[in-house]
Image: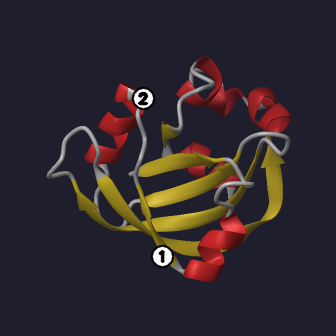
Amino acid sequence: MYYLLKTEPSEYSFADLQRDQTTIWDGVTNPVAVKHLREMKKDAKLVIYHTGDERQAVGTATVESVDASDPKNPKVKIKAGKAVPKPVTLVEIKANKLFADSPLIRQGRLSVVPLTQEQFEALV
């Protein structure tokens, strides 16, 4: 399983995750994004995407554990991975036909987006 997690870098950046090494990804309120968090499994691969002025995929992470005991507020522990060699901008993502039907493009406000293996590999 592969997912993209969006974060506002001024609130919690990929550099913050690298510094902390692990964090709990919670506080997501969109019902579709919450559903994706609940579906995550240990070792799922993640892309960290900076929103706001940056709008680019910047790093990787993996799922350490999922606590879905509160179905409306699942807590997913993630572990920092590596920075991507070259950040992939939203403009580049939109130009890539692999993402034509992706919720990343179709549902721009969605903060947790499932990815295919091919999409994940294109971003990292």
Q: On screen, 77 above or below 5?
A: below
Q: Name the residue located 48 percent from the left edge and 48 percent from the top edge.
A: 3
State how many labels appear: 2
Callout 1 crowding tier (Cα within 10 Å): few <14, some 14–19, many ≥20:
some
- Which residue is nearer to you in this view: 38 or 11? 11
User: Regarding mark 1 in the picture, which secondary structure is present there?
Assistant: strand
**Residue 89 vs residue 97: left or right?**
right
The image's mark for residue 108 is none
Horizontal and vertical percent position of residue 49: 67, 49
Q: Name the residue located 53 percent from the left edge and 37 percent from the top edge.
A: 111
Q: Name the residue located 54 percent from the left edge and 26 percent from the top edge.
A: 103
Q: On screen, 60 above or below 34?
A: below
- Residue 12, by quadrant, is bottom right
Q: Which residue is mark 2?
A: 30
Horizontal and vertical percent position of residue 84: 74, 65
- Which residue is nearer to you in this view: 24 or 110? 24
Q: On screen, 51 above or below 68?
A: above
Callout 2 crowding tier (Cα within 10 Å): few <14, some 14–19, many ≥20:
few
**Residue 84 vs residue 105: left or right?**
right
Horizontal and vertical percent position of residue 123: 69, 51
Quadrant location of the C terminus in the rendered image: bottom right
Mark 1 vs mark 2, CA separation in Å: 23 Å
Q: Are marks 1 and 2 in contact (CB under 8 Å)?
A: no
- Residue 109, by quadrant, is top right
Horizontal and vertical percent position of residue 106: 60, 18
User: Regarding mark 2 in the picture, which secondary structure is present there?
Assistant: loop
Q: Which residue is mark 1?
A: 22
Instruction: Specify the amino acid type for callout 1.
Output: Thr
Label 1 or label 2, whichever comes before in sequence order: 1
Instruction: Specify the amino acid type for callout 2.
Output: Asn
Q: Which residue is most to the left? A: 69
**Residue 111 vs residue 16: left or right?**
left
